[in-house]
Image: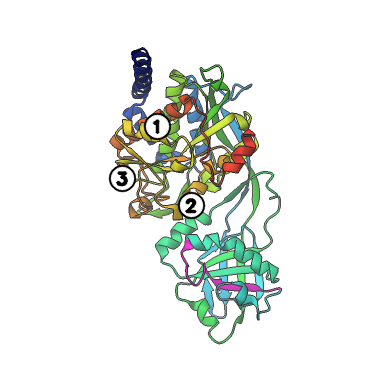
Amino acid sequence: MKKYFLPIVFTLFSILTLAQDDAEKVASTVSKSEIKGHIYFLASDELKGRQTGSSENKIAAQYLANMLRSYGVNPIPDTKSYIQNVALLKTSSATTTIFKSNTTEIKKIIPITKTNANFKGKAVFVNYGTPEDYKKTNVKGKYVISYVGTKDNNDMRFAFSKIKEKRELAEKNGAIGFIEISNINDNIWERISHSLNGDKMETVGSNNSKLDQFSYAWVNDQKEEISKLFTDKNEIDIALTIEGVKQSKVTSQNVVGVVQGTDPKLKNEYIIYSAHYDHVGIGKAVDNDSIYNGARDNAVGTVTVLSAAENIAKYPTKRSALFILFTGEEKGLLGSKWYVEHPVLPLNQMVYCFNSDNGGYNDTKLATIVGLSRTTAQKDIETAALKFGLKAIDDPAPEQGLFDRSDNVNFAAKGIPAPTFSMGFTAFDEQITKYYHQVTDNPDTLDYDYLYKFFQSYVLACRNIANNPTTPFWVKGDKYYEAGVKLYKK
C-alpha cells in the first residue's frame, strides 16, 4: 500500500496548489478601485444611459474595446478590430396617441405593435379575449376591446406574455385591431411605458421591412370610463389615433476579443464570457433626474467580464476565451441574437457561455447564478464563490423567467450551456425593483466591498471552468440538452 500513498498525496497536493494558484492569480488582477473606476465611467451621466444606437452607447463600446486592447486581449480573428457591427432596424415611438368614444378621451396609451393607426369605427367588448368570449360575437372588420391578462391574473408582466395568444385569436376571428384596458397606478404605468413605449429595434433581416398592419395597444383606463361604455351594450363607436411611427436603419456595436488557450487540445474549445453594456437611456424625470444610468444593469456585469479579460489575458487558461460585450439587450437581446447568427468563430467550438447580467441585489452573502444546476459546471462555480466568502445559489425567482430574459438564452437555444452570473438576490422584491430600470441605479449606491468578492468569485469560476479537464455540458433532461447534442454531435 505504501508505494501508492506518495503519488496519491502528491496528486492531491498538486490539485490544491493549482486551486490556490488560481485564486492568487485572481486576487492579483481584480482591484476594487479599478472596478469602481469602470463602473463610475460606464454609469456616468455623461453616457446618458447607454441607449442602443446612441452616440453615448458608441463611446461605451470604444471604451470597452480599448480596455480589451490594453489588457492584451486579441481582436476579432483575421481583423485588427474589436468591434462587430450590428445592423438594426429602428421603429420610432409614436408622437401622438389618443383613444376617443363619446365624451371619453384617454391619452395614456402604450402601442404594443409599432404601427400608425387612424381608426374610426366599431369596437366590440370581448371580456378577457378567450375563445369562449368570441363564440357569439362578430368582430370581423372591427377592433376588439378586452381587459388585460386573464380573469385570474391581470399582472402586467403576465398580461404581456398573453399578447401573442390574444392577438392570434382576434385575427383568426377577423378583428383588425386590439385594445386591452388596465387600471393601474401612475408609477407602475410610467415604468411600463418607459420600458415599452420607446423606440423598438430589431436585427436587420428579421422579416421586418414593413410596419405591422395590426394595431395592438394597452390603454390605462384608471377611471374605468371605457368599461362603463359597455354597461348595457357590447359594441361602441371609437376613434383610435396613433401617429409618428417611422422606420430607419441603425448600426450599433458588439465588442469582441479573444485569448488563446494553453493546452494543445483544449485550446480548440472556447469559453464565452459575456455581458450586455447597453441600458435604457433617458426617460421620464423623477426628482429632476431623467438619466437611467444602469449601474447594476449592467455596468456591473460588463465590468465583471472586463475583470475576467484582464485576468485571463495575463494568465491564460487551458481553454481559449472569447469575450463578448453585447449591445441591444434591453431592446430584445439583439446584440447576442446578431452574434449567434454571425459568429466570429464556429459555434460548435464554444463549449460554454458564462454570461453576467444583473437587476440588483438584496443579499451580500450570495452570488445568484440563474441556471446554476442546469450545467455540469455547478461545482466549479460554487467552489469559486466559496473561496471568496460567498455562497452560490440557483435562481430563487423562477416565475420571473430570468434564464430566458438575458443574452445567454440565444446561446442556449443553439445548444451552448449558458447560465447567468448575477449579484445575490433571494427574491425579485422591493430592494430589486427600487433600482431595476430606475433613475436611482447610480454608481454611488453600490456596495463595493461586496462587489470585490463578487468579481473575484466570477473570475475564479471562469478559471475553474476553463481549466477543468472535463468539458462542461447541460445536465441531462434540460430544456436545451438535445440542442447541445445536435450542436456538438454527441
The residue under label 1 is 38
Lower position in the chain sequence, tag 3 or tag 2: 3
Lower position in the chain sequence, tag 2 or tag 1: 1
The residue under label 2 is 401
Q: Crowding near pointer 2: few (<14 within 10 Å), some, many (20+)? A: few
Q: CA distance from mark 3 to mark 1?
A: 23 Å
Question: What's drawn in magenta, residue-wise?
Answer: 141-156
Q: Residue at x 60, y 32 (%)?
A: 84
Front residue of this view, candidates 212 and 451: 451
* Label 3 close to label 1 by CB (< 8 Å): no
Residue 345 in which image quadrant: top right
Identified by mark 1, the residue type is His
Q: CA distance from mark 3 to mark 2?
A: 20 Å
Identified by mark 2, the residue type is Gly
Question: Which image quadrant: the N terminus?
Answer: top left
The residue under label 3 is 363
Question: Which image quadrant: the C terminus?
Answer: top right
Q: CA distance from mark 2 to mark 1?
A: 29 Å
> In the picture shown, does residue 281 fall above or below 193?
above
**Residue 238 seen from this side:** no
Identified by mark 3, the residue type is Asp
Q: Identify the colour scheme used.
A: rainbow
Q: Secondary structure at mark 1?
A: helix
